[in-house]
Amino acid sequence: MKYPDDLDPELIARLVESGGGSLTRKMGIEFLELGAERSVATMPVEGNTQVIGILHGGAHVVLGESLGSISSAIHAGPGRIAMGIEINATHSRSARSGVVTATCTALALGRTLATHEIVVRDEQERRLSTIRITNILKDRPTT
């Protein structure tokens, strides 16, 4: 996986240890590139479909939120966390098989808010969905 040079070592350790979280692992999401400005991940359609055999809309959103939240956490930096406060998705096409690829791009990176757009595409590069997420950036609580 490709990480930015200045990525918080604690965040890297948490990502490696958790695989991005239990839901991410269950869905087969694989992170290829992670950064505040741009991140990329893939997810298989198989195992993530709804009753009519197409990729579940919620699966698109989980993929998008996973990328957007990690990208926001990278932007937040050491000692800070990112928490999603708003997400929306527009589904343009469906997929029945193969692997989808999501590309996350920063729209606005501030001190307290980060907004990203995630585009999910099929293996033919057709846009399947567009997701937008905003995360609030806060100091990590002390325990």
Image (cartoon, grey):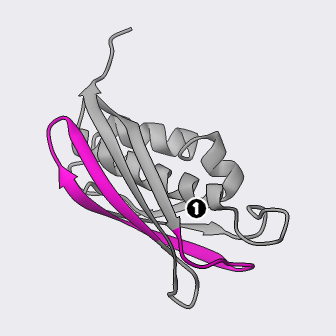
Q: Residue at x 28, y 40 (%)?
A: 8
Tell me the crowding category of disc 1: few under 14, some 14 to 19, or many 20 or more residues within 10 angstroms, Cα based: many
**Range shown magenta:** 91-119
* Three-letter code, disc 1: His
Quarter assignment of residue 55: bottom right
Is residue 107 shown in magenta? yes
Residue 133 x/y as whole percent: 38, 51
In the image, taking residue 53 as reference, residue 115 lies left or right, namely left
Residue under the point 28% across and 51% down: 115
Q: Nearer the viewer, residue 56 or 10?
A: 56
Q: Furthest-right residue in view? A: 51
Q: Position of residue 90 (x, y in %)?
A: 50, 66
Q: Residue at x 26, y 54 (%)?
A: 36
Which residue does the numbered mark 1 point to in the structure image? 60
**119 or 24: nearer the eye?**
119
Q: Main secondary structure of the magenta part?
A: strand
Q: Secondary structure at mark 1?
A: helix
Q: Quadrant of the N terminus?
A: bottom left
Tell me if 118 is positioned left or right of 52 in this view.
Answer: left
Examine the structure image and report whether residue 11 is included in the region drawn in magenta. no
**Against 85, is 115 above or below?**
below
> Is residue 58 visible to us here?
yes
